[in-house]
Amino acid sequence: WHPLTWWSHMLDVELFDLDAGAHHRTSALLHGCNALLFFLLVLRWTRVPAAAFVAAALFAWHPLRVESVAWIAERKDVLSGLFGLLALHAYTGYARRRGAARLPAYLGTLLAFGLALAAKPTLVTLPFVLLLLDLWPLRRGAPVLRLVLEKSPFFLLSFASSLITLHAQEASGATGMAGVLSAGVRVENALASIATYTAQFLRPRESACLWPHAGLLGDGAVRELLPTAVAGGLLVAAALVFAWRRRRDAPWVGVTLLWSLGSLVPMLGLVQVGYQSHADRYTYWPLLGLAVAGAMLFETLLGALPRHRGLVRFGAAAFLLTALVSARVATDAWRDSRSLWEHCIEVTGDNFLAENNLGNLFAREGKFEEALGHFERSVELYAGTAPDPDSSARWMNLAAARSALGKHQGALAALRKAVSLDPSAPQPRIALADALAREGKDGGAVRQLRRARERNPEDARVAAKLATLLATTRDDGLRDGREALELARAACKLTASRDPLAVSALAAAQAELGAFDRALALQERVLAAYRDSSSAPDPFEREMLQRMDAYRKGRAWRKTP
């Protein structure tokens, strides 16, 4: 749920149509604005330009930022970041003012926070960040209860946003992975993600657009993840102990660490959404805290090592330059889809989703031999303990590639696997029925469509497919014009007679019952509408012309052997 982000995309389309470069430039501009806002924010907090520059550069140049900026669909990161930073600016002004002058700043903070949530709800943790900032750098001495009550409107917004987001994700099926990964695996991955994010921040390297969840790669991958999870748990414990010990002389340590750690909680996969173990884009807001920590460490070292300030500056410059070069290399991978997925496989290793997407890319280009290898690798790698929402689709992709290469028995086997993984879904059964019909196994095709109809009585495509087969099969024992007519009418009712497949099924059923004039009129209407929406003749249009020729001659249409 991110309506503000959708509006920003719509505005881009109004201004630039579908010019991808212009859309990219908008995201880059927003990221640049965020870097400037962050620089000014840290400058307000520390009054040290060098520290503010280090913080802004750590944030802006790090390769972890690439995904959020280069991927147009991740506009929500840079847009929510913009309003989140504006909220921090407004809150800083509120905390430093007195009397009636504070109210506009308070309301500005609340407004900016609401807009940030409307851009991306993961900023629900911002009220906690505000409480941390009260400790440092704002150093507000008010009673804790008063500070908490002051944030109550912010907590209410966070609560409402969380409910809306959860409802939206459940409605869209985004939480379907919850039944695939056990709670233990999700906790293990969450701890491992903390260690991984920290390592990625401290050792800038090439990023990847998808890091597959170990729980989907089998028990071996989960066991291999355990040391990283233990390291993550120890890292959290050590950081908290260190922050507590330095709470008086260096309160920034605890504030920045808790800022980053707390802001990561919604993205750690405790409620799993998607296939990723962790994602670079999830760090856009949380690692602002570590960027501030890096800046404060830089300033602290300059003060503690007066004789080695040149070395400290050189080390900071070297780190920032390394991050910038790594970000540049990572950006190159986003130049086209093939580069992106090949780079993803190169960086992450076993990656079933990247293999599937690369296979789809080759299939669209008609390179089915190359596609087949990637599809086979994809279904081989996925080892989830339960079928995920898209597992049947990957087997259907494999079936399509095998069929295109003439490996029809292999295609049927893949489609049967797809049906077994998601028996209630109509599309796998429709695909299996189509494949069986092409092999002349109309009886098997009818059985699959009847089962799909039982599970999906409101699916017009299933009704239309079954009606067409019952009206046009060459098997006299299967053919049933009256049932076909009933099914076709149901399909037309479900689609308000606007679906070419449903109306063509009705025409075929009418022809089977001898009403050739009605059949011809229906098919002519479908053809006219189809030509208006189709740019070039295709097999379906050619078949419609053949059907019309048969109806003119007073013959029912029969399925091509």
Image: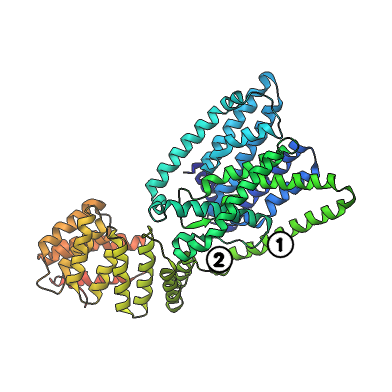
Which quarter of the figure has residue 444?
Answer: bottom left
**Count of labels shown?**
2
Q: Is 3 left or right of 486, judged from the image as shown? A: right
The x, y position of residue 197, in whole percent, is 61, 54
Residue lying farthest to the right in this orientation: 307
What colouring style does the render use? rainbow
Residue with the mark numbered 1? 325
Instruction: Write the residue at 41% across / 44% down.
Output: 168
Residue type, label 2: Thr
Bin the neighbour count of mark 2 within 10 Å (Cα to Cα): few under 14, some 14-19, many 20 and up.
Answer: some
Which residue occupies 58% across, 27% down?
148
Q: In which quadrant is the C terminus drawn? A: bottom left
Q: Is residue 389 above or below residue 162?
A: below
The residue where tag 2 is placed is 348
As drawn, the residue found furthest toward the top would be: 99
Q: Residues within 10 Å of mark 1 (few under 14, many from 20)?
A: some
